[in-house]
Image (cartoon, grey):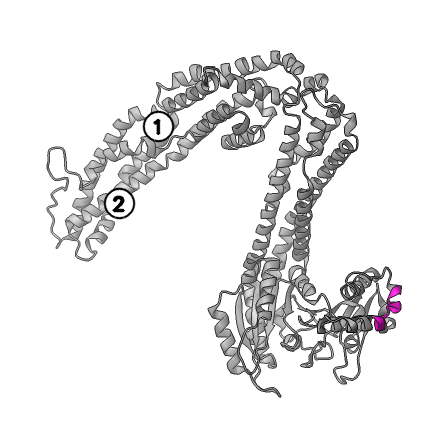
Amino acid sequence: MGNISEQIDEIITKRKVQLKYIESAREAADAVLENMYIFKDFQNEIRDNLETFPVIEGGFDVAGSIESIPTEEFFNLHKDYVSELERFIKRLNRDNLNISFIGRTGQGKSLAMQNISGLDSSVIPSSNRGDCTGAKSIITNSESGPVSAIIQFYQKDEMVDIVNQYLLKLTDGRRFIKDVSDIPAIKTKELRKTLYKRKNETVKEEDWLDHLCKYVEHYADYIDDLGTTKEVTEEEIEYYIAQYSSMDAEKKYYKYLGVKLANISTPFLNRDAGKIVLVDTVGIGATSLGIEEEMLKAVENDSDAIIFMFRPDNKRGKISDNEISIIRNIAERISPEYTKEMLFWVINRVETGDSGDNVHQASDVIQTIRQRNYPIADVFNVNCSSEDEVQNRLLIPVLKQLSSRIQDADKLLLDKLNTKGEHLFQMYSQICQATDRAFASSANEDLKRKFYRKINPTIKKGLLNELRKLYLDDYNNLRHMPCEELMNAASGKFKNIIKSVPTKEMVMDLLSYGDANQFNAYEACTNIMRMQIIDDFTELNNVLYTIVERMKKQVLHIFTDDDKGKLGLVYPLGDSSDEWIDGFLNLVEGEKKYPFLSDALRKFQSYTINVQGFLIHEIREQLDPIDISLPRPDGSSSVPQISGSMAQPELVAEEIVEWLKTYAEDVHDNVEITLQDVYKTPNRSMFAAIKDLYDRITYTMADNESKIAEEWRYLYEDWMHLIWKDEYQQQSAVKVIADEWNDVVSKLKEINKPEYFIIRN
């Protein structure tokens, strides 16, 4: 098997490195939750004392708006997110890779695990007579013997829950116990009579009652062990996990009723199996309650790879609804993407036996599986009675794929976590925005008049006048000058025009292609050169983007700086102009409340300059000398006369290269001359963009009224509680809640950042 054990060790080591990032995310999730609980407590305080908070004149109820901000969905999602975080931490924290064996009863799970671990049926019960394994067990590959096990028993409250699931099912929820000591007093005979009298009783209900009877009648077998852990020898293991003796089926055991988990250690037969743990689940289809849910929990919490065992019937090679249901439920639980990486379907091929072989049926089933789109990683045909086949056709292929796939599988789970974290961040941000909106429009008319002496100068002098200065004093002068950054970046592109000429070796390759002649080779060279030149100049888009973004940030600084427009106190300016415009308009509900202002900002947001828009047609026009599809102005051919013959390809290639160099120099000179005027375009264009924005947010009229002036006033009135927070609290009728509110909201906003919700490494 080679170095698979070393690869597994390396995977475990890498997981430990990644673990610190997941643990940091867990700590961040706690910080988020703590802040949300503070906010929730504040809401509850308001909710319990609504009558003490004044309603602002005009009917706007600030306290009511605060207490009505919905949080339940956030808390539910946060709980789910933390649960997955903890599951992922547990996964990365393991010192082994876990392989779970699942399937219906009697499919060969125990037989396969015996031939991997070397344990016999006294430790891993195996039978074709139905349920034989009573408790979930895990089998760890240890470096040396002897075989031993750590037996972990249920806690008493867990046993109460187990018994109650039977009682509640059998009595339609009418009966249940409160303490483990109540178990012996359960009247199973009366339950049997009642069940028999019911006309709609089922075999399943009879089976449930049979299981409940075991807990009642064999109470003494497990009660003293509950809540304890025992280390036992190989000879004792069967007594704790099996339902009957491997040597004598008439000898039954009941200790398993109290066993939660048996952790068995043994040296595996294949020493290169490395740090592998086999997880043995109780067979699905066993008549006790909760078996499939326990299997799904094992798959979700304890599995790195999943072995799905299936032994086809010896008469019909058919996949039943049971198998499809198992795979579907697993895929839904941990995602179809993960099962495609880590679920291996093992077809247990039986060659001899009392009930006959299923060799042909096994082949038919595999053919069916391969034809269908089941979410599985692979399917194996294995005779699970053969140690050699189990080792070479099951264990080794699984370990090889496990070692190569597990990191991708971990990445799938991490991406799933981050998707949920992103959703949680969006919800958290929405709550933060809702807290801002709670005070918006809360001021009465008297308060608005008091703040008008602050609002009016801020709009006219702080914002509009500063924007006017920007386009008049800065960009008005610049628009008559070339854009130096574009000019400097383009200078490097001029040099590349000469470099675009193919080498002699490239031309000779073109000449040798099929039945190509001098004309074909020359045409191919010009085509290549034009595309290289165009692509090279298109890269100037990066420079133009930087220039435009810088201009937009200059404009938005006027909107947001504390000594200018002050709107950064409503929504702070970050690294992106797009993000600020989107975030600001979303927060203030701009399209709904301030449509003219929103329209102006959206038009400014969409403004861009690109090479395709103003430069490429100028470049292409100067490429005519190396475009033979276009005739020259005088009507002559644009193909040069090449005197060399094809009998002398090297001389022909040299001549073509010389012609191309000559034309490339012409292109270089023509492009350089042409672009002298074009370099002014970005500055002229940006001047126009700023001027257009200024005009729209200053002069927009509707119905012969300055609607934009109204919108500016309404905007600052609505958000004065943030823009002039201290003064607002002193004057506002909501001061009674403002002090505590500011503290609560500040804590919320401090961590309204993606890094508190997204795992980065």
Residue on which the image places disc 1 = 487
Q: Is residue 235 magenta?
A: no
Q: Where is residue 143, by image quadrant?
A: bottom right
Q: Which residue is mark 2?
A: 528
| Amino acid bearing label 2 | Ile
Picture quarter containing residue 312? Answer: bottom right
Residue 324 horizontal/vertical position (percent): 57, 68
What residue do we see at 39% from left, 16% from top? 477
| Residue 313 pos. (x, y %) | 57, 80
Crowding at mark 2 (Cα within 10 Å: few <14, some 14-19, many 20+) = some
Say if residue 268 shows up in the picture.
yes
- Labels in figure, total: 2
Tell me where the magenta segment starts and ends, as one range: 181-190
The Cα atoms of the two marked residues, 2 and 1, are separated by 25 Å
Residue in the foreground of this view, choosing between 624 and 446: 446
Identity, as a three-letter code, of the amino acid under mark 1: Met
Q: Position of residue 263 (x, y in %)?
A: 74, 68
